[in-house]
Every structure is written in C-alpha cells, then in structure tokens.
Amino acid sequence: MQTFDSDGVEIAFLDEGEGEPINFICLWIDSAGGSAAESIALINYLSDDVDRAEVHVAAYIPNMARADAAMVAMSSDSISIGPRASLGGDGEAVLLRNDVSDLVSRAKALAKARGTHWSLWAAMVDRSLEVREYTREGTGQIAYFCEEELNQQRDSDQWQPGIVISDAGTLLMVSGERALELGLADNVTNDFRQFQNQFDLPEPPQVIKRNWAHAFIEKLRGNCFLPFMLVMIGTSALMTELSQPGVGLPGFI
C-alpha cells in the first residue's frame, strides 16, 4: 500500500483477516487544501491502482475538505461528513489555473465513470462556473448543471432552470447538512464511532503511518537552508574539479 503526503488526509485500511487482502479504505479528511498535485496523485492512485470492485473507499470528513481536498473526497465510493463541516470553497493555498483545469478534468472523469454529474464538484475549485438547479419536465427529476454540462445532456431542452446554487466568481462551499441535500454526501455523521457503525466495523481501521525514512525526508524538505547549502557545496566542488586535471572526489560530489 502506497502513502501520499496530502495535507490533512489520513489513509486507513481494513483487511479481511490475517494475510487477507485489503477490502476497505477510509480517507480521514480534515484539510483546508494544500497541494493540488499531491491530491491528484492520490485521486489517480485510488482510481487506477485500487480494485474498486473489491475495495470500498469511504471518506470521513469531521471538519473540512476544502479546495483540492474536496476532489479527494469525490474520488471515494461514499462520503460521511460532519453536520457543520465544510466541503469545497477557498483553501489555504490559491489554486493556479493549471491546477484548476486538472482538478476539473478529474471531476469530469470520475463523474463519467460513475454515471453522475460533475458541475457541483467542479464549482468547488473553479470560480468561473455558475451552477443552477434544473428540473426535468414530466418527471420532476432535479439535477445541478453548469452551462457546459447542461449542453452535454441529450435532452437538454427538457431541463427547466431554477435557482442558482453557485454564482460565477465565487467557489461553492457547503455545510455537511447541505451536502447531503445536494447529493454530495451519503451520510451526516457526528463522530467516528457513528462512522464505524455505518459500515459495521468491529474496530477502527489501521492507520497508515509514515516510516522513519518518510519523516526524515519531510524534515529535510522543510529546511530552507538545505538547498542553499547544496548549491554552495556543488559550486565549490565544481570549481575545485575544474582547477585540477583528472576526475577526483570533488567531481563525484
């Protein structure tokens, strides 16, 4: 099992027994967004490398899953969210245009694979979208589309526009209870024990933790002086090597 450094996202798994394969993965998401690239890597892993016919992926959001973290939640099979938790909206980091494009593309791909709609999810990261509630004539079916997704419907002329759910120029952010109303979440959950009961889990899943190597690399990455030191050492070694014939230790450095 791989692990990913996506801020505020913990991965836990439950296997079937001693030596048996994993059949349940819990994404414990409590994140204001961090790195779109790492979130996309996690989404791709869950979509491409996990056998979703054999493994159920459930997202648990006690407090928040904003910006790119909301897209990680979308990649799960089911979402359990706290009643006052926030889903979508601005994160701690401003998403670049390329990041937004990549995240929206993943939302479209996930929705296509599951036969669902993507507009509400895309509006959580793309502030250019306006999403409305639409009602289908004759059936009373309700769905939520931006203009692009509405035009993709074969019966687009049968959908009558209603209230605006997300204005253009802002990012969609909803509470846990509102997410349930809009069909973005499957359950409103007060705590993790209730989450366990929803899936009849006899005990909490085992949390995947980083080993000492991951922790050491993270510590080095957070040291702002290390890149400067490496450049200085490399430059000094290069100058020493150029001033002497042959290949010596400075050349290897």
Image (cartoon, rainbow, N blue to C red):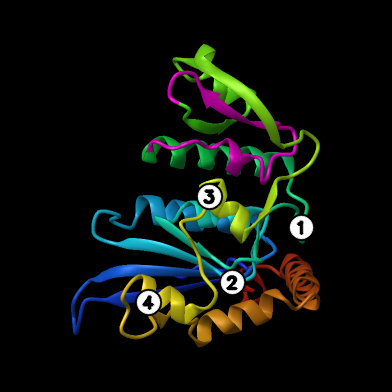
Does the magenta run of residues contain 90?
no
What number is the disc on residue 184? 3
Sequence-wise first label, 4 or 2: 2
Q: Which quadrant is the N terminus positioned in?
A: bottom left
Q: Earlier in the sequence, mark 1 or mark 2?
A: 2
In the picture of the structure, the residue carrying the numbered disc 2 is: 62
Alpha carbon separation for disc pair 2 and 3: 15 Å
- Secondary structure of the residue carrying numbered label 3: loop
Q: Are marks 1 and 4 in contact (CB under 8 Å)?
A: no
Q: Residue, x 76% and y 72% (percent of image)?
A: 240
Closer-to-camera residue (117/49):
117
Q: CA distance from mark 3 to mark 1?
A: 23 Å
- The kind of residue on which mark 1 rests is Ala
Packing grade of label 2 (10 A; few <14, some 14-19, many >=20) is: many
Q: CA distance from mark 1 to mark 2?
A: 21 Å
* Residue type pointed to by label 2: Pro
Q: Position of residue 77 (x, y in %)?
A: 39, 55
Disc with the residue nearer the chain's start (2 vs 3): 2
- Where disc 1 sits, the SS reads loop
Name the residue at 77% across, 69% down.
231
Residue type beneath disc 3? Leu
Q: Nearer the viewer, mark 1 or mark 2?
A: 2
Residue 93 is tagged as 1
Badge 4 amino acid: Asn
What range is drawn magenta here? 115-139
Q: How many marks?
A: 4
Q: Residue 197 shows which numbered tag?
A: 4
